[in-house]
Image: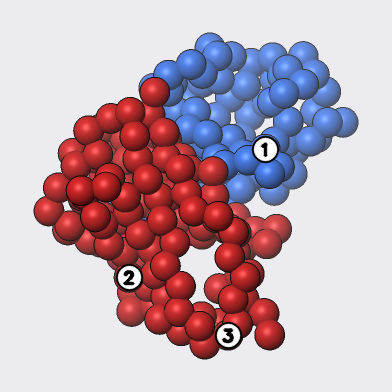
Amino acid sequence: EAVLTQSPGTLSLSPGERATLSCRASQTVTNSYLAWYQQKPGQAPRLLISGASSRATGIPDRFSGSGSGTDFTLTISRLEPEDFAVYYCQQYGSSRQYTFGQGTKLEIK
Amino acid sequence: EVQLVQSEAEVKDPGDSLKISCKGSGYRFTTYWVGWVRQMPGKGLEWMGLIYPGDSETRYSPSFQGQITISVDKSISTAFLQWSSLKASDTAIYYCARVHPNGDSFDNWGQGTLVTVSS
């Protein structure tokens, strides 16, 4: 299965700024089966984006996903204080196998 | 409302067996795959495996194959994750999560079960 590499490891930004998080796969992600999650300390992960670009129910439109093949991006257009968290990408491969990236920590500058 | 409610935290000795649970409600339990994800202290997410409650078909990550058993009791809408002999390295938070209808992601998550293995 594809190995997912997220960059940067840590991103330091201020509220109101734009955040761009990258997820690169070691091989083509089939059908753009790529998802993004947000995890805050002490909480379970929350699905943000599935199918590379479809926002999950209740996710604000400042979150957007893009990309295909091996390169994917999560963009947060204007950071709100509650957006500072760890973000994971995840891909779905053949035979119902799933892989997560190592995560990007988005911290307040 | 879709909910996945997991069993309480456990403290075990190395070599002990353990079975933790995940009860689904608010949806048709038998028609959605349920997965398990490990998060070791201060680390990222690792997919372990999943099960289809309708027929108990299971899939395991190669990293966890042979180390864990995933099962289900559809009569009580509950999935299980079990170990026959715990190690200290099994100390982690374990999450169950429902697979999104399109199969590519996990759309609803349990609150997590902390398993501590220590002598």
Q: Quadrant of the C terminus of chain A?
A: top right
Where residue B53 appears, as percent x and y from the top left, is 21, 50
Q: B18 left or right of A7?
A: left
Whole-angstrom CA distance, mark 1 to mark 2, is 29 Å
Q: Is residue B80 above or below residue A51?
A: below
Q: Quadrant of the N terminus of chain A?
A: bottom left
Find disc 1 in the rendering and name its residue. Answer: A40
- Given the image, on which type of amino acid does mark 3 rest? Pro
Residues A41 and B81: in front is B81
- Given the image, on which type of amino acid does mark 1 rest? Lys
Judged from this view, the residue extending furthest toward the left is B55
Whole-angstrom CA distance, mark 3 to mark 1, is 30 Å
Is there one chain holding both mark 1 and mark 2? no
Identify the image quadrant of residue B115: bottom right
Q: Crowdedness of circle 2 by 10 Å Cα count: few (<14), some, many (20+)?
A: some
Find disc 3 in the rendering and name its residue. Answer: B14
User: Which chain is in red here?
Assistant: B
Count of numbered tags: 3
Q: What chain does badge 3 belong to?
A: B
Where residue B58 appears, as percent x and y from the top left, is 22, 61
Where residue A69 appears, as percent x and y from the top left, is 36, 40
Residues B85 and A76: in front is B85
Is there one chain holding both mark 2 and mark 3? yes
